[in-house]
Image (cartoon, rainbow, N blue to C red):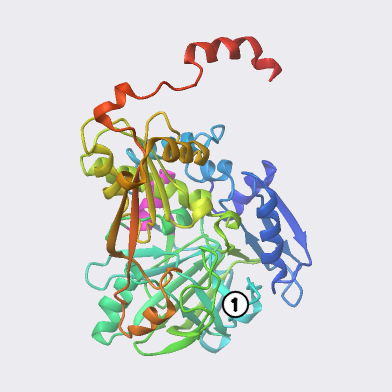
């Protein structure tokens, strides 16, 4: 597999999925172009690389949309690159996860990362072409496609997560982590609750496999470094941080070492988020933990990696999130001992991060479909609608799913509403007044979820009305005769 982001991009360009643009302003123009391209492309959103950026050093580049196509997702995860059907991509990934074994990172003594080193007063983050994404954003965002690296002071567990980061000034950043995420548990539950400062690392331009792992929902204590190494079949190379002592990705483009102190904050936001809204606190600025940068390392001609947060249909990370979330839900269902799971699709590419989930099953016993729906509905943290369909329905085909809901369910019997379920401050359906009510961290926010059973009732399924659909035999006969003409 690829060694680093640069080699990965070379292979992407050779495949025809990279487009270079010169002279584009990082203030609104870059993100605007990405939104236009994403809105017009279908399953082939190219990686956009911007160079010769006005007001920034020559050679400094910004890259958008790493995992925006099925081929790039397959390549990054070591899956067959000729199989780009969404459900086959998911099945290939789920099957692969059954055999992946964690491989811890490998320490090396030298890295291109140290081609440029700045410490203390030398540090100047303003040189980098950090985008202003949306017209109503409260600042430029340094971290949207990156890794925030933290170490649990008790167990030594190293967490790599993607949590948004705003540029404050030449040597300060503001860190926003949602309630309940592993990074928040380490920061608030381990360091700040004890009155201790937290060492932190921010890595930009990581290996895309490591970035995929950083937003995958791994269990507590499972390091994303180990997970990415398992995917690649070889360890991620790291170097020991000179300030934090933590493992730094040796081949990243830009790495920052710093610290957060309890009570030290910066006004952060607003920021248009993954679901397409300014939902954290609307257009208000919110105090968030301040990162004081102690050391900055970057390669020659460094690349900022960015991900456009926007309406889900325009967010090119949606497919990779769908693959990651769908596989995790599928494994959770099977891990709960529930049989008959035939497919899962989490519509992250059109409905946001886990808000719309579909599971297809082979019905095996009374109550089976409801058991599946209730279990799946509790993943992830903001699931909104969960639909259970039968195994003749492709869960990744929304047209089939809607047909099943409309023709196989009776609303008074099929829809179940669950109250007092987990949520967080990014939820766009919780009123601002309720979010303002709580001054503690984490905020005790809740929401409801709906489970829709779109399966034919098992007790009289055999008597169900005949389907107006060609048989498999007739389909194959027609295809064999006319396939070359179609």
**For residue 170, what is the image quadrant?**
bottom right
Classify 10 Å Cα crowding around label 1: few (below 14), some (14-19), many (20 and above).
some
Question: Residue 332 in the image: x percent, y percent?
Answer: 28, 46
**For residue 11, what is the image quadrant?**
top right
Asked whether, in this view, residue 189 is left or right of residue 481, the answer is: left
- Count of all numbered marks drawn on residues in the image: 1
Q: Is residue 361 above or below residue 217?
A: above
Residue 1 appears anywhere in the view: no
SS label for mark 1: loop
Asked whether, in this view, residue 192 is left or right of residue 305, the answer is: left
Q: Residue at x 41, y 78 (%)?
A: 243
Q: Is residue 360 above or below residue 226?
A: above
Towards the viewer: 477 or 269: 477
Q: Residue at x 24, y 34 (%)?
A: 339
Q: Is residue 93 above or below residue 321?
A: above
- Kindly identify which residue carries mark 1: 137
Q: Main secondary structure of the magenta part?
A: helix
Asked whether, in this view, residue 21 is left or right of residue 204, the answer is: right
Towards the viewer: 83 or 467: 467
Quadrant into which the C terminus falls: top right
Asked whether, in this view, residue 300 is left or right of residue 250, the answer is: right
Residue 476 appears anywhere in the view: yes
- The range drawn in magenta is 223-237
Question: Residue 184 in the image: x percent, y percent?
Answer: 34, 73
Verify whether residue 229 appears in magenta: yes
Verify whether residue 2 appears in magenta: no
Q: Is residue 91 above or below residue 225?
A: above
Q: Residue at x 30, y 78 (%)?
A: 188
Question: Residue 406 in the image: x percent, y percent?
Answer: 44, 40
Q: Residue at x 39, y 83 (%)?
A: 436
Question: Residue 92 in the image: x percent, y percent?
Answer: 43, 35
């Amino acid at each position: 597999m690829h060694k680093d982001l640069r080699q990965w991009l070379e292979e992407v360009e050779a495949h025809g999925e990279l487009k270079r643009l010169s002279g584009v302003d990082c203030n609104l123009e870059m993100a605007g172009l990405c939104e236009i391209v994403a809105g017009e492309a279908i399953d082939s959103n190219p990686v956009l690389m911007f160079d010769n950026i006005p007001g920034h050093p020559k050679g400094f580049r910004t890259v958008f949309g790493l995992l925006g196509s099925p081929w790039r997702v397959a390549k990054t995860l070591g899956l067959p690159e000729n199989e780009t059907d969404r459900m086959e991509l998911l099945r290939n990934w789920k099957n692969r996860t059954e055999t992946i074994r964690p491989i811890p990172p490998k320490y090396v003594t030298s890295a291109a990362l140290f081609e440029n080193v700045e410490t203390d007063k030398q540090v100047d983050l303003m040189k980098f072409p950090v985008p202003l994404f949306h017209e109503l954003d409260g600042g430029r965002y340094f971290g949207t496609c990156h890794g925030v690296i933290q170490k649990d002071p008790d167990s030594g567990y190293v967490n790599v997560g993607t949590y948004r980061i705003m540029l404050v000034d030449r040597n300060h950043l503001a860190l926003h982590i949602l309630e309940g995420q592993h990074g928040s548990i380490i920061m608030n539950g381990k360091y700040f609750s004890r009155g201790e400062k937290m060492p932190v690392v921010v890595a930009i331009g990581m290996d895309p496999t490591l970035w995929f792992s950083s937003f995958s929902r791994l269990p507590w204590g499972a390091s994303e470094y180990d997970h990415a190494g398992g995917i690649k079949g070889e360890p991620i190379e790291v170097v020991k941080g000179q300030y934090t002592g933590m493992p730094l990705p040796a081949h990243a483009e830009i790495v920052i070492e710093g610290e957060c102190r309890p009570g030290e904050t910066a006004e952060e936001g607003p920021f248009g988020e993954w679901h397409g809204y300014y939902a954290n606190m609307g257009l208000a600025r919110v105090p968030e933990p301040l990162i004081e940068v102690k050391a900055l390392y970057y390669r020659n001609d460094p690349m900022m990696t960015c991900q456009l947060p926007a309406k889900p249909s325009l967010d090119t990370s949606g497919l990779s999130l769908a693959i990651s979330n769908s596989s995790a839900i599928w494994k959770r269902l099977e891990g709960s001992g529930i049989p008959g799971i035939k497919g899962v699709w989490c519509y992250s590419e059109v409905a946001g991060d886990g808000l719309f989930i579909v599971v297809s099953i082979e019905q095996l016993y009374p109550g089976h479909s409801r058991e599946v729906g209730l279990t799946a509905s509790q993943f992830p943290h903001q699931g909104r609608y969960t639909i259970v369909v039968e195994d003749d329905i492709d869960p990744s085909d929304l047209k089939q799913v809607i047909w099943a809901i409309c023709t196989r369910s009776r609303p008074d019997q099929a829809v179940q509403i669950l109250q007092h379920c987990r949520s967080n401050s990014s939820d766009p359906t919780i009123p601002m007044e309720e979010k303002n009510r709580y001054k503690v961290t984490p905020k005790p926010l809740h929401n409801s979820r709906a489970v829709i059973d779109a399966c034919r009732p098992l007790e009289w399924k055999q008597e169900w009305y005949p389907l107006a659909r060609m048989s498999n035999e007739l389909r194959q006969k027609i295809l064999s005769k006319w396939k070359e003409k179609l």
